[in-house]
Image (cartoon, rainbow, N blue to C red):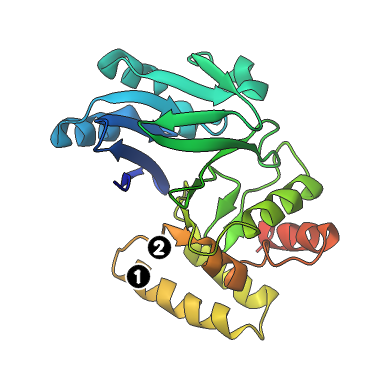
Amino acid sequence: MALDIVRIPAFSDNYIWLVHDADSGETMVVDPGDAAPVIAEADRRGWTISAIWNTHWHPDHIGGNQAIKDAHGASVIAPAAEAAKIPSADRLVAEGDTVKLGAHVATVLETPAHTGGHISYHFDQDAALFPGDTLFAMGCGRLFEGNAEQMYAAMQRFAAMPPETQVYCAHEYTLSNARYARVAEPENAAIAKRLAAVEALRAAGEATVPTSIGEERATNPFMRAASVAELAERRAAKDAF
């Protein structure tokens, strides 16, 4: 049975993902920066959260860890390279490790750039990717602790995934990203079309994620960058956009 993936808005533009496997009854949550809406949604659905999967150490992604542990007895899985910054971690994972939700298996991918030890979780068989703040709809994360070479490698790795792969981004940044993408690739008709669609969704108060790898290949100027230098140039331009 397919995973039940629930989008929970938090703060001004975060998305926390609550993931349930009906076959086993197990539930996990990805990057709960705020515990309250997560606990409320899980309780409303009658789900017990057994695990928390963190992608990186930023407070808007781990801030709810301890409260969810206390309320549901969840264990925290976190990137080994950021262990010192995630004191609530129970299990540390790195490149190639696997984590499970029932019979569903996700592979840990090291995708540093936004932070030095950032990881992503890829459910290959379920065609689902949780990239934290590495990949966004039509964008990528800022290079706070890493560099353009690392981000380019991550983008190429994501681009190689099947186009139907659903991407569960951690922020609602799509409108800003789409406006920049239009400038970065003014001749790209797919970007122009998607910008119009995103503007309509946001005007109606609707979310624009998840996205898909196929959509990102066609419209994400960072995934489409032809070289490390081009990605670096585009990231710098977006930072100042």
Q: Residue at x 82, y 62 (%)?
A: 227
SS class, disc 2: loop
Q: How many marks?
A: 2
Q: CA distance from mark 2 to mark 1?
A: 7 Å
> Please, is residue 42 above or below residue 174 in the view?
above
> Please, is residue 187 above or below residue 101 in the view?
below
Nearest the eye: 8 or 2: 2
Q: Which mark is residue 208?
A: 2
Is 166 situated left or right of 26 in this image? right
Q: Residue at x 29, y 69 (%)?
A: 204
Is 212 situated left or right of 116 in this image? left
Question: Is residue 194 at all visible to an observer of this figure?
Answer: yes
Q: Which mark is residue 108?
A: none
Q: Quadrant of residue 210?
A: bottom left
> Please, is residue 9 above or below residue 197 in the view?
above
- Point out residue 184 in the picture as x, y percentages from the top left corner: 69, 73
Decide: few, some or many residues near mark 1? Use Cα within 10 Å; few <14, some 14-19, many ≥20: some
Q: Would you say the residues marked 2 and 1 are in contact, meaning their CB atoms lie under 8 Å apart?
A: yes
Question: Is residue 64 at all visible to an observer of this figure?
Answer: no
- Point out residue 100 in the picture as x, y percentages from the top left corner: 44, 30
Q: Which mark is residue 201?
A: 1
Which quadrant is home to the C terminus? bottom right
SS class, disc 1: helix
- Point out residue 196 in the picture as x, y percentages from the top left corner: 45, 80
Q: Residue at x 42, y 45 (%)?
A: 14
Give the residue type at disc 2.
Answer: Thr
Nearest the eye: 167 or 21: 21
Q: Earlier in the sequence, mark 2 or mark 1?
A: 1
